[in-house]
Image (tube, grey):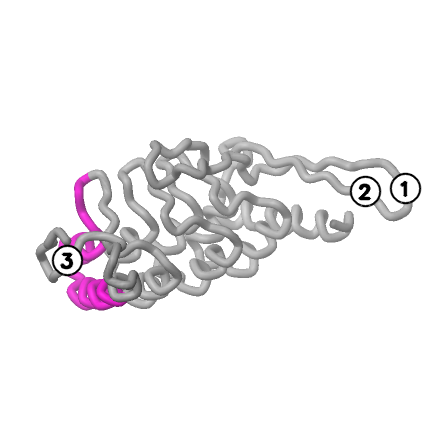
Amino acid sequence: MSSKRVITAVAAAACLALVVGLEWKAAPHMRFSFRSHSDTTQTEVDIGLGDDKASSKDLESEPVVGAKTLLHTAAAGGNLGAVRDLAEAGADVNARDERGRTPLHYAAENGHQETAMALVELGAKLYAKDRQGCTALHYAAKNGHNDTAGALARAGADTGIRDKAGQTPVECAIAGGHQATAQAITDLHGEQRAGDDGAHSRGPAISMGRVFKS
């Protein structure tokens, strides 16, 4: 990466931090290294982007928590440009905040479909659970974000997965009074099951308001 591009990314991150009032000291640091084309000296820049790496066993294990990063903040605000710039600069798209939530959780919670899909393309884990056992789809569902929930499900998010309270995304949507979201996820859940060749379902069969075991 060129020194000019790194400096631009650092400047963008600094501006974002000032806008949202985020304290640099609150986030773990990430180190960027680059070499100038004009000399062989390696320059290192530290900025608070977070270096907490998510485990490959996110689905089953308790998430390793850290602190809210600039990428979390950009995702929460639906700032697609900042999300792409930060990720390209090396920010961890699966970094965890103190509640175990990733930037994808934030984008989904706030209904930022385009940002959520960009994060998925950049490597965000659809199955990552926070400390309450919720995935990004749970957050989209409980907040009634139909389009975002649908996009996550079509991208491969498990529509039958349960949080620590035992609730699926459909049940979260119903609890929040979002019947249209619940129905949309139910329909997509049926499509997921149909795509499993009838041999192995992705989760329990879902009906509005009730869950029937396969």
Q: Is 152 on the left-hand or right-hand side of 4? A: left
Rendered location of residue 130, percent (x, y): 33, 40
Identify the element where label 3 is drawn. Answer: helix
Would you name the residue on which mark 1 appears?
39
Q: Which residues are magenta?
A: 165-191
Q: Amino acid at mark 2?
A: Arg
Left or right: where does residue 48 sit relative to residue 180?
right
Q: Amino acid at mark 3?
A: Ile
The type of residue carrying mark 1 is Asp
Measured Cα–Cα span from mark 3 to mark 1 = 61 Å
For the residue pair 24 and 203, the one nearer the viewer reads as 203
- Mark 2, residues whose alpha carbon is within 10 Å: few (<14), some, or many (≥20)? some
Q: Residue at x 50, y 41 (%)?
A: 69
Residue pointed to by mark 2: 35
The earlier-in-sequence mark between 2 and 3 is: 2
Most prominent secondary structure in the magenta stretch?
helix
In front of the other: 29 or 166:
166
Q: In terms of depth relative to the viewer, which is nearer, 158 or 197? A: 197
**Who's the residue at 48% across and 55% down the image?**
119
Given contact means CB atoms under 8 Å apart, are the residues at marks 2 and 1 in contact?
yes
Going by the image, does 42 lie left or right of 121? right
Q: Would you call the spot at circle 3 few (<14 residues within 10 Å), some (14-19), or many (20 or more)?
A: many
Q: Residue at x 70, y 37 (%)?
A: 45
Viewer can see residue 46: yes
In what quadrant of the picture does the C terminus appear? bottom left
What residue did someone put label 3 on?
174
